[in-house]
Image: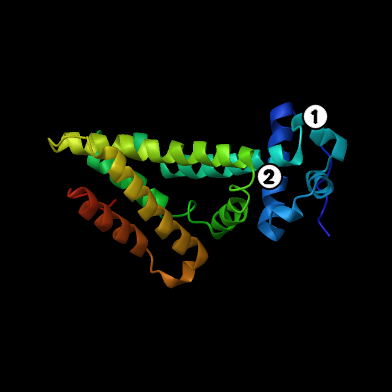
Amino acid sequence: MSARRPFIRAGEETRRAALIEATLDLIAEGGPQAATVRAIALRAGVTPGLIRHYFATKEELIAAAHETLMTGLTDASAAALDSLPDDPLGRLAGFVTNAVSPPVTDPRSVALWAASMQLVPRDPVMRAVHEATYLGFRDRLEAMIADALRAADRPATEARALAIAGNALLDGLWIEAGALPDHFADGELKSIAIKAFSHLLELKLPEV
């Protein structure tokens, strides 16, 4: 049985965030089917009717939870980049390194992604959210690749194609890291990702 969180008075955004977190917890524990309105309300410590105040349908809430998860992973991949020197290669290397490191590679995040992906082909709202969050990550990667190419006096005309390939590379390493975290030595995936990107872009990325 799901433990009920104690009821607390909270602002609109805080309560909305609590509903999303409760939804993510339930999906992580039992898949999308476990995230019923009653279970979400119980976990969040609210009445089922209150959920309708924030989300028109359960599907809308699950889509919002997926958006929160994926946007958070992109933000974590970009964490602390502003503190790096103004060096396009160093910033790209930092992004690549973050994308295959904790907290991005938390097994819970990979499990949540896998559970949510089964809804994408048949739920247009989930598809729209997945498309937007995928492009949010890929577009950021593309911009950094373009900057790195220009810094090396090379045209950025292939930045989109390289970002698509690079995103697929990072996704594969991310899934492996989250699914089998004990199979990799400390720093191993970071080194693999940097070397793979260096080969892909034909540039020497620093290991950060």
The residue shown at (28%, 45%) is 162
**Kind of residue at disc 1:** His
Near mark 2 (Cα within 10 A), the count class, few <14, some 14-19 or many ≥20, is some
Q: Quadrant of residue 135?
A: top left
User: Can residue 137 be seen in this snapshot?
Assistant: yes
Q: Residue furthest left?
A: 153
Of callouts 1 and 2, the N-terminal one: 2
In the image, 119 versus 208, the foreground residue is: 119
The residue shown at (80%, 29%) is 53
Foreground disc of the pair 1, 2: 1
Colouring chosen for the image of the structure: rainbow
Image spot of residue 26 (x, y percent) = 72, 53
> Does residue 64 lie above or below 166 as drawn?
above
> Does residue 74 lie above or below 200 as drawn?
above
Q: Circle 2 — which element?
A: helix
Image spot of residue 43 (x, y percent) = 79, 48
Q: Residue furthest front?
A: 122
**Kind of residue at disc 2:** Glu
Q: CA distance from mark 1 to mark 2?
A: 17 Å
Q: Which residue is mark 1?
A: 53
Residue 33 vs residue 117: left or right?
Answer: right
Q: Which residue is mark 2?
A: 21
The residue shown at (32%, 38%) is 142
Which mark, by number, is residue 93? none
Q: Circle 1 — which element?
A: helix
The residue shown at (31%, 34%) is 143
User: Can residue 187 be seen in this snapshot?
Assistant: no
Q: Quadrant of residue 100?
A: bottom left
Pointer 1 and pointer 2: residues touching (CB < 8 Å)?
no
Which quadrant: the N terminus? bottom right
Image spot of residue 11 (x, y percent) = 74, 27
In the image, 17 versus 149, the foreground residue is: 149
